[in-house]
Every structure is written in C-alpha cells, then in structure tokens.
Image (cartoon, rainbow, N blue to C red):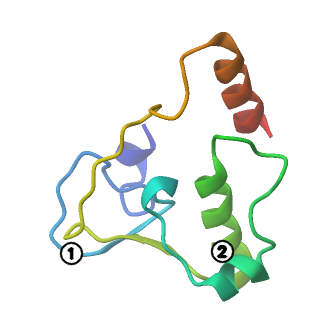
C-alpha cells in the first residue's frame, strides 16, 4: 500500500534497480556499517531478539546520525530465511513481541 501511495519514500521492493537506491532498511543478513556508527547509536537493542534488529538500527542511524540505508543492486547473495530457526509458535511469538516493541 505504501509503495503505491508514496513511491519516493517507499520504493517498490520487487523492482530490479540498476543504481543504488535509498531504502528504509536492508536485511540484516547483508547489512554493512561502520563500527563507529554502530557504537554511536548504542549497538543492538537488547530488547529485540531475532527479528527487526535491522529495521531498528536503520531507523536509529537515520534519526541519530542522519545516515540513510542504501540498497546496492549490483551486489547479490543467498539468504536462507529461517534457516537458523525451526518453525514453532515460540518463534512466532518472539517475532510479534519484537514487532510490537
């Protein structure tokens, strides 16, 4: 919905881009940042476990340091989503707790 209403702020996630594009966040499995920036924002929030760490970090980089996140489409990788966890109701509960936090 947000991609349709405000595409300049919420770029289409399924489009293939040729140039780097500013993004609200990038997946944590392929996030790179300076250690100094990570330290300045206080590192990972220990209230978040397993989900939404990258969204939180990206938001704090932007709000605290004025540093945006970018997607570089020339780079690629394979990420096995959920590969480090087994499907269970406890994992789903943890995900929702992090989302609500």
Q: Quadrant of residue 58?
A: bottom right
Query: In the image, what residue occupies the spot 28% across and 75% down?
Result: 20
Asked if one can make out residue 3 in the rendered structure from this viewpoint, the answer is yes
Q: Which residue is mark 2?
A: 61
Please tell me which of labels 1 and 2 falls first in the chain.
1
Query: 28 or 15: nearer the eye?
Result: 28
User: Residue lying furthest top in this view?
Assistant: 89
Instruction: Give the side of residue 49 with respect to residue 79, left or right.
Output: right
The mark tally for this picture is 2
Q: Residues within 10 Å of mark 2 (few under 14, many from 20)?
A: some
Q: In the picture provided, is 84 more to the left or to the right than 22?
A: right
Give the residue drawn at x 65%, y 52%.
Answer: 53
Left-right relation of 2 to 100: left
Provide residue 78's location: percent of width, then percent of height: 28, 48
Give coordinates of residue 98: x percent, y percent. 74, 37
Q: Where, by quadrant of the figure, is residue 60 drawn?
A: bottom right
Tell me: residue 29, above or below residue 8.
above
């Amino acid at each position: 919905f947000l991609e349709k209403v405000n595409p300049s702020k919420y770029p289409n996630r399924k489009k293939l881009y040729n140039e780097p594009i500013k993004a609200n966040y990038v997946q944590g499995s392929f996030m790179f940042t300076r250690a100094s920036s990570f330290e300045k924002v206080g590192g990972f929030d220990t209230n978040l476990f397993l989900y939404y760490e990258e969204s939180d970090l990206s938001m704090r980089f932007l709000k605290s340091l004025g540093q945006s996140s970018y997607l570089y489409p020339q780079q690629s990788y394979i990420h096995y989503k959920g590969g480090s966890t087994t499907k269970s109701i406890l994992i789903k509960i943890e995900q929702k707790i992090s989302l609500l936090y």
